[in-house]
Image (cartoon, helix red, strand yellow):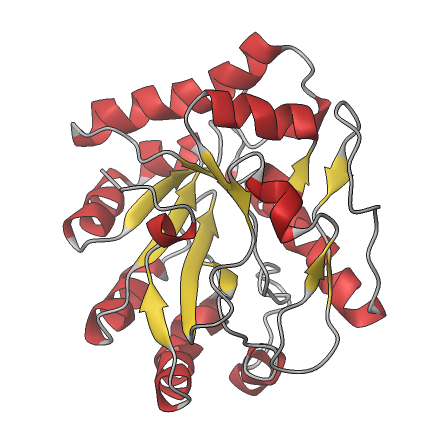
Amino acid sequence: MFIILGRKTVAAVLSAAVLVTAVAVSAGGIYHNASVAASAGADWGLSFGTEGQPPSGNATKQHLAEFNAHYLGDTSNKRIYLTFDAGYENGFTPKILDTLKKHNAKATFFLVGNYIKTSPDLVKRMINEGHTVGNHTFSHPDMSAISDKAAFTEELTKLEDLFRETTGKELPKFYRPPQGKYSEDNLRAAQELGYTTVFWSLAYADWDNDRQPTSEQALSKLIPRTHNGAVILLHSTSKTNSEVLDTLLSRWEEEGYSFGEISELSGEKTV
């Protein structure tokens, strides 16, 4: 049985999604072997080497592609992909959307059921302004712990149904595993449902509302590690992100980056 998590619980659970990456970055290590056992769960992690170069993931780009899963775009082009995860609305998304519109930058918002239920007008605004809404599951569980295929499927299809009821549109088939937890069985199941699984290649500690980084800290974490084909994970619940996004996008533009749409990762078309 699945439940819709409350605001504080969602915040705590969502934080784990980036915690794996943040620790991997600071330690410079990778948590798991590049090949993940089919039924064994893994936490998505990154290892950064040279500044400005793509990191290594705990599964290779080529291996993930077998399941239509991606964490990087084309590294020969100065193109980056903006993604935001959200389990609830914290009052900052309107400003984030205003900034994206100013820069004509399209983003993907990976949402859970709670967000769509409580913030339908913002979901509709995302769509109307050309952004993509992706599937972050209905109730944000550890999907790698769900061995029953029907239960796994239900987490995705319940969000599809809610999105359709709310917007009158079909949910684009892009999926981000909650907390970055996955297994090859998960990836295969998502692929069989027609989904592209989207991890990330750049993130920072932006999720804790009680310990928000300064704008300077955010820029110092993100700018040096930006790389061609970067899939960037931010949280729209972050006050810092709403304040620094205009400067951040301007810096990226000055460095010659353009903003791509998530459909480019696998050639899929958004709805």
How far from the left and from the top, in percent, is residue 95?
29, 67
Left or right: where does residue 190 sit relative to residue 21? left
In the orientation shown, which residue stands out farthest toward the bottom?
254
Q: Residue at x 57, y 61 (%)?
A: 209
Q: Is residue 147 above or below residue 163?
A: above
Q: Position of residue 41 (x, y in %)?
A: 76, 32
Give the quarter of the image for residue 225.
Answer: bottom right
Q: Nearer the viewer, residue 250 or 243?
A: 250
Query: Based on the displayed image, in which of its 4 quarters is residue 217 positioned?
Result: bottom right
Residue 62's spot in the image, x, y percent?
Answer: 62, 48
Name the quarter where the N terminus is drawn: top right
Left or right: where 58 falls relative to 217: right
* Left or right relative to 148: residue 2: left
**Towards the viewer: 49 or 136:** 49
Depicted 169 relative to depicted 124: above or below: above
Residue drawn at x 50%, y 60% as measured from the top left: 231
For this view, does 218 lie left or right of residue 121? Answer: right
Which quarter of the rendered picture does the C terminus lie within? top left
Q: Is residue 199 visible?
A: yes
Identify which residue is drawn at 44% across, 31% down. Answer: 195
The mark total stands at 0
The location of residue 250, given as percent across then percent down, is 35, 85
Up the image or down, 68 lies above or below 157; here it is below
Front-most of residues 104 and 122: 104
**Observer able to see residue 2:** no
